Image (tube, rainbow, N blue to C red):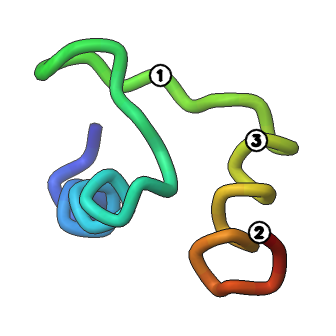
Amino acid sequence: MSAYASKAVAEAVCKGLIHSKTETAFAPQEAAVLIKQAMQYLKLIN
């Protein structure tokens, strides 16, 4: 992952929007799951 993206990814992981496979491996989830998690974080859905 690019150095410039690591801060944003770390923040998204902290907020539970995305998850890593392991401590050192990141694998994006399907778009629908990411959208659902973002909507839950923003309290648009339960």
Q: Callout 2: helix, strand or loop?
A: loop
Residue at the disc numbered 3: 33
Q: The disc labelled 2 sits on which kind of residue?
A: Asn
- The residue at which mark 1 appears reads as 27
Left/right of residue 3 with respect to residue 46 in the rendered view = left
> Contact (CB < 8 A) between labels 2 and 1?
no
Q: For mark 3, does the 10 Å Cα neighbourhood hold few (<14), some (14 to 19), or many (20 or more) residues?
A: few
Front position among marks 3 and 2 = 2
Residue 15 at x, y = what percent? 35, 65
Q: Nearer the viewer, residue 11 or 41?
A: 41
Give residue 30's quadrant in the image.
top right
Mark 3 or mark 2, earlier in chain: 3
In the rendered image, residue 25, in percent from the top left (x then y), is placed at 26, 17
Q: Is residue 25 above or below residue 36?
A: above
Q: Residue at x 50, y 56 (%)?
A: 17
Q: Residue 46's mark?
A: 2
- Could you tell which of marks 3 and 1 lies nearer the N-terminus? 1
